[in-house]
Image: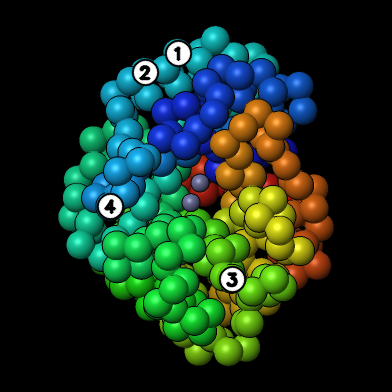
Amino acid sequence: MKADFHLHSTFSGDGKVPPEEIIRTAIQKGLTAICFTDHLDMDFPYTELSFELDTEAYASTIHTLQSKYADQIEIYFGVELGLQPHLGDYYRSYTSQFPFDFVIGSTHLIDGFDPYYPVFWESHSQETGIQSYLDITLENIKATDTFDIYGHLDYIIRYVPAKEKVFPYSDYADMLDQILKLLIEKGKGLEVNTGGYRAGLKVPNPCPDILKRYLKLGGEIITIGSDAHTAEHVGSSFSLACDILRACGFRYFTVFRERKPVFYPL
Ligand SMILES: [Zn+2]
Ligand SMILES: [Zn+2]
């Protein structure tokens, strides 16, 4: 099984290619399964980009394509929710209205600020930026049950101003334990997001220390996703992610169908 469970098409505000092109590329690259996870970030504070999602049109397009390509590739219907602590009820109601196979919960904003923009770092050091990101992540997990896996858990490291972008795991081990234990208690998984490599990291998000700790604490649900916003990144670094997971001690990775995890050997 070669499955990419984090993909953005033009239904995302920042997606570059239509869904059908992603599907054709995935078939060419020999993927067995893909899941579209276009963005929905409610109350996104920046006006230059909208992360609202026309979910009706998105659902109907993906379902048409599922039938069209059924004999060539498994296609799943998912979404990536940009979580904020006040959106728990909104997302609960939203996800119950559509037949999603898979839901990613992600932290993209810290108190209404996106650390992607350099202005965030004018008022935060690396230390306070990471701490705030993890604080909000824990709040988001407490506020929301309506996701299957947490997206790119240490994603903020992509945007710290330091040249060497290495997540200082041991400085945040206690906080990460709280996050990982809560995820496990709620039956939620983690993803290995290979977009980290494209952001200049030497490891995926989250880093192997976090993956190992999740496993040690009893976590078992791991998806693999490229977070591609262009055709060339579809399925990127999939086998590297498998190698890393094996090295961390995992024996299985996960694919979701109708919100239920199905395990495949690595
Ligand atoms: Zn994301
Ligand atoms: Zn994404």
Mark 2 touching mark 1, by CB under 8 A? yes
Q: Is residue 40 left or right of residue 17?
A: left
Sequence-first disc among 3 and 4? 4
**Disc 3, SS:** loop
Label 2: few (<14), some (14–19) or many (≥20) C-alpha neighbours in 10 Å: few
**Please, is residue 253 above or below residue 52 in the view?**
below
Nearer the observer, 54 or 110:
110
Q: Which mark is residue 45?
A: 4
Q: Which mark is residue 60?
A: 2
| Residue shown at the point (46%, 58%) measured from the top left | 117
Q: Position of residue 53 (x, y in %)?
A: 32, 33
C-alpha distance separating marks 3 and 4: 22 Å
Q: Which mark is residue 205?
A: none
Type of the residue with mark 3: Pro
Nearer the observer, 219 or 198:
198
Mark 1 highlights which residue? 64
